[in-house]
Image (tube, grey):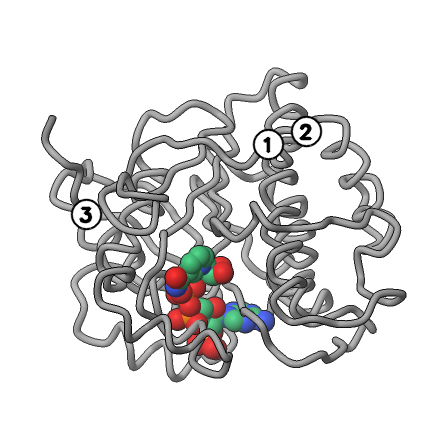
Amino acid sequence: MAKWTADQLPNMAGVTVVITGGGGGIGLVTARELARAGAHVVLAVRDVDKTRRAVDGMRGEFDVRRLDVADLDSVHAFAGSYTGDIDVLINNAGVMDIPAARTAQGLDVQTATNYFGPFVLTNLLLPRLTDRVVTVSSQLHRFAKLDLDDLDWRSRKYNGLAVYESSKLAVVLFSLELQRRLTDSGSRVRSVVAHPGIARTGLVTHSPLGFVNRLPFLVQDAERGALPLMYAATQDVPGNAYVGPDGLFSFTGHPLIRKPGRAGLDLAVAGKLWQATAALTGTDA
Ligand SMILES: NC(=O)c1ccc[n+]([C@@H]2O[C@H](COP(=O)([O-])OP(=O)(O)OC[C@H]3O[C@@H](n4cnc5c(N)ncnc54)[C@H](OP(=O)(O)O)[C@@H]3O)[C@@H](O)[C@H]2O)c1
């Protein structure tokens, strides 16, 4: 069977896609390709000027707006100020293995960026979503030890990589519970997960794992790494699909529906995680 590429994107005229953190890395490639296919792309980013420069000259329609997804006030401000319809929300913004820090609300920055912020943003935008939510995870979710009693890393010693792994399992479980809720309420909106395999981007540049970017056989470029996001955002995949590269260990390759780790399929944990996160973030969900 022919491998899926961005050339197979459908005509997306009339489709509005919101991409968080789309000013660089795989988010920017996704934005560029979806806009090229005709989508109206809303880029929700920390640095509006940098992102405007990044999309300058690209074909298509971009609306660049300010969002710091780690800051829940900014999440509420973005959701309140963007009043248009949204067909697809891509929760792409992320950080990996950063030093310990707290947000304005006192939350762990890495967990807030990768999980709490997307949780709140999705719930706020959900009433206006018509097609799907794509949440970006990582194969590293397979190594996570999620602690439902310490989601915000207050009682455990902070370890940047362990925090990343937990946040990426949390979003897989978030997507699972979201799909369950959507199905129960009769909604046609889908919740799906995409992961890029290992893609050469700015994600690990400040981390001891930065050497990974120099391993040519293990890593693909951002162009290829973005394909699972585009596939998950546009193809007729079922709710709960976990889309990633088709190569060995799903490190590189073309998009295909794969399976998350076993912990990412636990509906009971997903339900408890949802309740705990809603309480922690003050979300009515
Ligand atoms: N690259 C990989 O191998 C890999 C593997 C698995 C999963 N992922 C996931 O893929 C997603 C994209 O990462 P990437 O590889 O493209 O890395 P990247 O080049 O570092 O891009 C991450 C993007 O997220 C944005 N961002 C970070 N914190 C933010 C915040 N608080 N609010 C809004 N935007 C924020 C960054 O904005 P700035 O430009 O302002 O920094 C940047 O545009 C992440 O969720 C990451 O965990 C990547």
Dot placed on the residue nearer the N-terminal end, 3 or 1: 3
Eyeballing the image, is 66 above or below 241? below
* Relative image position of residue 29 (x, y in whole percent): 27, 61
Residue pictured at 59% horizontal, 37% vertical: 175
| Residue 262: assigned label | 1
Q: Nearer the viewer, mark 3 or mark 1?
A: 1
Is 276 on the left-hand or right-hand side of 222? right
The amino acid marked with disc number 2 is: Asp
Q: CA distance from mark 3 to mark 1?
A: 35 Å
Residue pictured at 18% horizontal, 68% vertical: 58
Q: CA distance from mark 2 to mark 3?
A: 36 Å
Eyeballing the image, is 243 above or below 159? above
Dot placed on the residue nearer the N-terminal end, 2 or 3: 3
The amino acid marked with disc number 1 is: Arg
Front position in the image: 40 or 112: 112
Quadrant placement of the N terminus: top left
| Residue 37: assigned label | 3
Is 96 on the left-hand or right-hand side of 216? right
Which secondary structure, mark 2?
loop
* Relative image position of residue 14 (x, y in whole percent): 29, 41
Quadrant placement of the C terminus: top right
Which secondary structure, mark 1?
helix
Eyeballing the image, is 64 above or below 188? below
> Could you tell me if the residues under marks 2 and 3 are in contact, i.e. CB atoms within 8 Å?
no
Residue pictured at 28% horizontal, 75% vertical: 214
> Could you tell me if the residues under marks 1 and 2 are in contact, i.e. CB atoms within 8 Å?
yes
* Relative image position of residue 99 (x, y in whole percent): 65, 81
| Residue 266: assigned label | 2
Residue pictured at 51% horizontal, 28% vertical: 240
Which secondary structure, mark 3?
loop
